[in-house]
Image: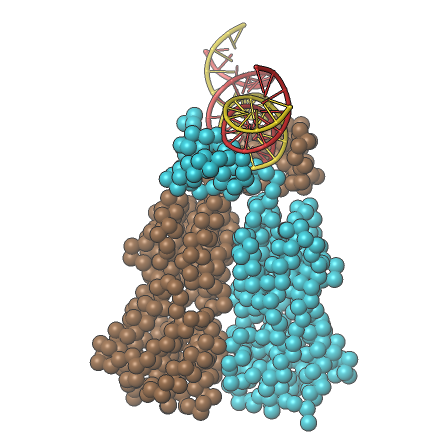
Chain colours: A cyan, B brown, C red, D yellow
DNA sequence: AAGGGGAAAGTTACCCGTAACGTAGCCCGC
DNA sequence: GCGGGCTACGTTACGGGTAACTTTCCCCTT
């Protein structure tokens, strides 16, 4: 009003109130349907709201009370992986239906990026956070604790989460796949995946996989972890590298289905028959897998359900209901046709 | 302080200032590196910031100045479609690199959902908005105008955008595909897609497609628009429906690659040879397409680049640079092997 | 007619940070 | 020695909305 700042924003509550000839507080009550006003006042205020095109300023609301916003921060490694875009979709649909907004963060699988993002998002007073993975930087962990808001860690099932956790046991899923391939008769197994600066779920799967194979008396002949993103291309070229070594390999387990399809394409381009000459196994369950002629042997994970479950746990906590701390959404081995059946 | 509200939030600037024995304003200056303080004061304040674990409250910052937030609202129809998840990734990576946060909105292809989302997001005082599509409800359009913030409409290239636009000419891309298939020799063409309550880019492509085919003297024998999402499954079952009618069809154009793969799988499961018995053409360019044995005839669109371009235009406007109003990111026909070449 | 009880509205203080302005103290030159 | 200019701060006043409290006014009771 003093003219020192130029008002560029929209209509404020005071302006609505003035136009209606009532106090700010009365207008506020009408808009929040808080009671304590007459029908004629309500109608008048609402009329002015319409006339002036008033849009409430939620920042001010959050700021005024000690309430949090309706934001929920969601961090995801990347969207190139169809897996995470489905998880995100599951989360946002559910949260959106209950009046919350998703603030996205792509952390590129690095803890530093995650920490920066957490710091920024927390400064917006979010209602809660959903983070992918259980490994965070010490400072991030400290901030999360200090924030005191609901937190769901997804993807890795975490028996002692910071707050809540929903996901699956990656070790077991790797183990089951290792056991399955071993039982199927493979003995010279290989692995192709990617690695990042963080201990990841994929690493845990690999651990389980190795454990199973070694437990059976075999061994994982060769592991290859590329410093790259886990896509069709890296699957293709990773397989080329793995096989170039000349070592005998009768079956390859991949970090995910996209890489497995890339690998499948590579070995077929080299004239190898699948599964007669070499077995191929993926992980994750890509939607396209179900309509391709080749049924990829894989481990199916209910991604959308995972996202929804995360959102449900978050919403329960936000509504003050007692929420369970962890939830296992499981996995299912899809036999497929890219590994040779025993007998 | 009066004890009427329980303070649950974190440490405030005042508390840091008090701990350091300076005024709020001095602490504020130190944190913003605004100058006007001595080195010893700076060190003291920063020490207290560390000790107390102070996190700035960005709500208050936005609120204090007449600045907008660093939020950018991004609306996307859905993430099931790999196309849009890539666009989103392109946007968020670029925006994130410049200190902005993406507030996601999945509008499910409906204008009503978009309008609700716009209303909500605007109440958070975003710095700008990126919306998919050029068709918005009248009220939405009005709110967007009134908000007076940068706006980028993506996907459809829009010669008279509300503010800025980046995308491609869907009519032309459909037209080019129609022309190509016609020139290749197909005469009994079919189309399988989905429809929603909004006039969509897919509809525009279909219009272009029909125009090209009719212009060549042919006609689109049969169009099928399912009220469903555009996935592998709907491609599969849509094709079943389309062919069940018994009408002669020698080539099918699909709304997107996912549907085309589903259709491909269906016709092959019925013993039809592709492209000898029937031609299959998709649209959009799925990453997996490049590593599958069957090279799908399709129209490639640079999704990631589209997202980045949208973010760049937004950032330019936010930094006050003169930004171009529209940008055409184009498309490229991928001949593939699922249509028969005219020899 | 006085008093009690509500409903409907207004008043005040505050949330947290920042812009604008005020001021104390110091150094400098003439 | 005094005014001018600079540095390093402090003070005040918002911004948009809400909680808590107060006031006004009307109706009903006794």
Q: Quadrant of residue A188?
A: bottom right
Task: Give the residue at the far bottom of this rendering.
Answer: A343
Above or below, comparing residue A292 to residue B18 in the picture: below
Q: Residue A334's spot in the image, x, y percent? A: 62, 80
Q: Residue A118's spot in the image, x, y percent? A: 61, 51
For the N terminus of chain B, the quadrant is top right
For the C terminus of chain B, the quadrant is bottom left
Q: Residue at point 78% right, 80% down?
A: A215
Q: Nearer the viewer, residue A17 or B236?
A: A17
**From this viewpoint, is residue A11 visible?**
no
Q: Residue at point 43% right, 27% down?
A: A1
Q: Tell me: B261 left or right of B189.
A: right
Q: Nearer the viewer, residue B309 or A283?
A: A283
Above or below, comparing residue A177 to residue B107 in the picture: below
Above or below, comparing residue B133 to residue A265 in the picture: above
Q: Nearer the viewer, residue B42 or B24?
A: B24
Q: Nearer the viewer, residue C7 or B123?
A: C7
Q: Residue at point 58% right, 82% down?
A: A296
Figure label count:
0
Q: Residue at point 47% right, 41% down?
A: A56
Q: Residue A107's spot in the image, x, y percent? A: 58, 58
Q: Quadrant of residue B20?
A: top right
**From this viewpoint, is residue A195 visible?**
yes
Above or below, comparing residue A265 to residue C28 in the picture: below
Q: Residue A127's spot in the image, x, y percent? A: 60, 49
Q: Tell me: B29 left or right of B158.
A: right
């Amino acid at each position: 009003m003093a003219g020192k700042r130029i008002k560029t924003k929209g209509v404020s509550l005071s302006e609505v109130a003035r136009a209606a000839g009532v106090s700010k507080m009365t207008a506020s009550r009408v808009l929040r349907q808080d009671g304590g006003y007459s029908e004629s006042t309500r109608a008048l205020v609402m009329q002015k709201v319409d006339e002036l095109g008033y849009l409430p300023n939620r920042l001010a609301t959050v700021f005024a009370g000690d309430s949090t916003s309706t934001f929920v921060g969601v961090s995801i490694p990347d969207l190139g992986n169809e897996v995470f875009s489905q998880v995100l979709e599951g989360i946002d649909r559910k949260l959106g239906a209950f009046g919350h907004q998703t603030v996205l963060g792509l952390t590129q699988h690095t803890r530093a990026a995650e920490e920066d993002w957490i710091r920024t998002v927390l400064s917006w007073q979010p209602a809660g956070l959903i983070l992918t993975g259980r490994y965070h930087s010490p400072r991030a962990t400290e901030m999360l604790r200090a924030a005191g808001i609901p937190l769901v860690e997804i993807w890795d099932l975490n028996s002692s989460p910071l707050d809540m956790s929903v996901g699956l046991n990656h070790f077991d899923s790797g183990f089951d796949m290792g056991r399955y391939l071993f039982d199927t008769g493979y003995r010279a197994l290989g692995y192709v995946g990617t690695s990042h600066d963080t201990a990841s779920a994929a690493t845990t799967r690999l651990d389980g996989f190795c454990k199973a194979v070694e437990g059976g008396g075999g061994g994982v002949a060769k592991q290859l972890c590329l410093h790259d993103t886990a896509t069709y291309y890296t699957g293709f070229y990773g397989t080329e590298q793995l096989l170039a070594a000349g070592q005998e390999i009768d079956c390859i387990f991949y970090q995910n289905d996209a890489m497995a399809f890339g690998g499948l394409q590579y070995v077929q381009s080299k004239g190898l028959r699948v599964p007669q000459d070499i077995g191929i196994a993926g992980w994750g369950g890509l939607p396209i897998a179900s309509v391709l002629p080749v049924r990829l042997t894989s481990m199916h994970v209910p991604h959308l359900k995972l996202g929804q479950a995360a959102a449900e746990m978050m919403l329960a906590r936000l509504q003050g209901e007692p929420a369970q701390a962890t939830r296992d959404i499981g996995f299912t081995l899809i036999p497929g046709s890219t590994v040779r059946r025993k007998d």
